[in-house]
Image (spheres, rainbow, N blue to C red):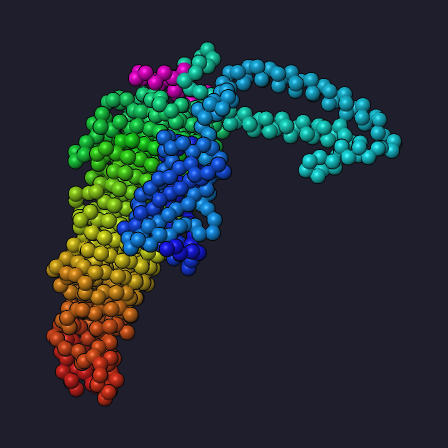
Amino acid sequence: MYRAGNSVEQVFGGTVIKQGDRTPLGFNFRTENGELVDLTGSTVQVKVASDKGVVLEKQATISDEYTAQFTIGSQDITGAGDMRIEFIVTYPAGTIEKFPSDDWQRVRITPTLEDVEKYGVGYITFEKLTGEFQNQFDEFTGGVDQQIDYQKQRVDNLIKNTPQPSEVIDIRYDSEGVTHETASARLESDYNKVTTQLAKIATYKEINATLPFGTTLTALKGNGTNETSALLALLNYVADNHLTLYIPKNVTILVDIMTITSKSNFGIRCEGTIKRLNSSPTVGSLLRFNSCTNVTIHEANFDGNALNNGCQEGVAYTSSQEQKHTLTFMDSNNVSIDKFYVLNPCGDGIYINNTSNVKMGTITGKADQRIGRNLVSIISGQDFFIDYLFCDGIGHYDMPGGLDIEPNASTEVIRNVFVNNVDIRSGGANPFSILAAQGSTVENIFVDKAKVTSLASTNVQCALITASDVFINSLKVDGNNGIANGLKIDQTITPVKNVFVKKVSGKNCYRGMEVGFQGQIDTLEVNGTFRNCTFDGVTLFGCKNSKFVLDIDSVGSARYVINFAPTTSIDNVLISGNLTKRGTGIKCLGTSATSDKINNVILENLDFTGWANDDRLFGAGFQGTVTKRNCPNLTLAATIPSGTLTQWKQGDIVWNIGTDPTVAFWRRLTNGTANVLNTDWKAY
């Protein structure tokens, strides 16, 4: 049977892609009520149709419980043009649902240069364009300049003080609705517009790096020799002449390091691969841009060749290995990286320092061992946008490992970072990190979706935040069978405030979440669900003016679901959620702190169902100012409290939800853990 009224939402990948481009396309499905559809255990069949009919059918991959993804590979023959996509979801129970119900998801596939050649449109080399066409264009423009002056004077003389026919009057109106004084003025205006447009088009001309060009430049061969000098010369040439360098597919260029300095208005389209030499002799980036503006990287594929440059999984990095980055931008502005891929980077895939206005499209990277520093490092600058980042295995054990937003010095600033979608699998120490390190300033960080799976073999963090003004809409963390912590929010030197995590889902973590070990976090809001933790579910070391909504099932057999362990203090905190006993754990809420460390904590709508009387609120620290309201199996109970370990405060009220009609509630008369009627409690 079929259900109707649903919709499809694209969460990563583009709506315009090239034929054979293996960029993953990701989609969420929503019900008629706008709720996300859980795809756990389901299969998703994809049909792609052009105006001639269905051209491709394949099965999507379920990357998480809500996201289906697929690629249109080089062997998938679809042709170019506007395509319609339909998804057929088969749920575990056998129900079938088609998405979307009232239309199609749409994507446009554009031809590659190879496809263009197949259809008889020859590739125009740059030298032909600047030779034959440019000569003709120069002759034309030289003649037009002379003719315009002549015709303008001639027409001006003709129309002075003479009534004009309608056609002559009409020609003075151009295509944009502007009225010119004379027809020749309109002609001159149109000429200037055409000249300007041609100049603009010239900035998009491409030269093929593998074809002969000029007398001073060497075409790339891709024959396994060191071609650093040849590629660097070509890069400088396109930068000086505001062109785009094109490196075709199936071409691998071996290089050491290259630096482009003080250039503007140029681009790179590398469909082939730029690869670091074996045992590269020079420390530095494969390709570095210093003080450059308006740089467009349409596509770039790199091989960091880390395994042949001394990098090994489990062996400590040297400083030179760490600094062998792939692509670096220093002191630059207005950078666009549409598509980027790196294999086995030594240091960072992309390293950005003192650079602003950076737009990144699809950024992907892979490591064959747990090596590399990061896929992307942002050191300083402002106004960054990342659409989709996928990191598969990059991350040495003593390096961060994925997306690292972290200044190197106290004077550096990172501001205004917008991240749409991040998916990281890494063995690094903190693969998703937003850090105000060294007393620096990091603020205004916005993340829509992030998924982090730790591959580490030691206790590390999936996600680490030590910065202010951070907003995360959705974060998923997997701690690798209880080895890594899920989310850690802390501070180093700079005080941290205003961190908002709308939804965090963690599984198989050591701790689900840790807050404020090195300093008290101010104004923190987290809605968290944590499953199967091997230590504490949540550990609160220090926070104030904060709110938590938590759903935690199982923790270590001798540990607490929520551990109040203040290294500073816990002040003005509201906690609600579902802590019903659904697994192991010795206590629900526990603390070893003194009561002066826990101040104005409110437990409201917090469910303690299933926990024994002595296992709900354990530790003398809860004799601080702790208010309990509407908490099942704590302040909502069928009998008077019993046991000898749960901490109660004078004035606490437990409402009777049992069958005794003579008691509405019990009111606490003393502070402590005893539970004697008319001594510690009075019935009302």
Location of residue 394 by image quarter: top left
98 drawn magenta: no
Q: Is residue 497 visible?
A: no
Q: Is residue 462 above or below residue 576?
A: above
Q: Percent x, y for residue 277?
A: 28, 22
- 403 or 573, which lies in front? 403
Location of residue 431 by image quarter: top left
Q: Residue at x 37, y 39 (%)?
A: 57
Q: Is residue 489 above or below residue 602?
A: above
- Quadrant of the frame with the C terminus: bottom left
Which residue lies most toward the front here? 1
Which residue lies most toward the top here? 215
Q: Percent x, y for residue 7?
A: 43, 52
222 drawn magenta: yes
Location of residue 75 by image quarter: top left
Q: Percent x, y for residue 403?
A: 31, 42
- Quadrant of the frame with the N terminus: bottom left
Q: Is residue 239 above or below residue 543?
A: above
Q: Residue at x 19, y 75 (%)?
A: 648
Q: Is residue 216 above or below residue 194?
A: above
Q: Which residues are magenta?
A: 219-241
Q: Is residue 515 visible?
A: yes
Q: Percent x, y for residue 504?
A: 30, 54
Describe residue 247's horizontal placement relative to residue 625 as left or right. right
Counting the numbered discs, the total is 0
Describe residue 174's horizontal placement relative to residue 556 as left or right. right
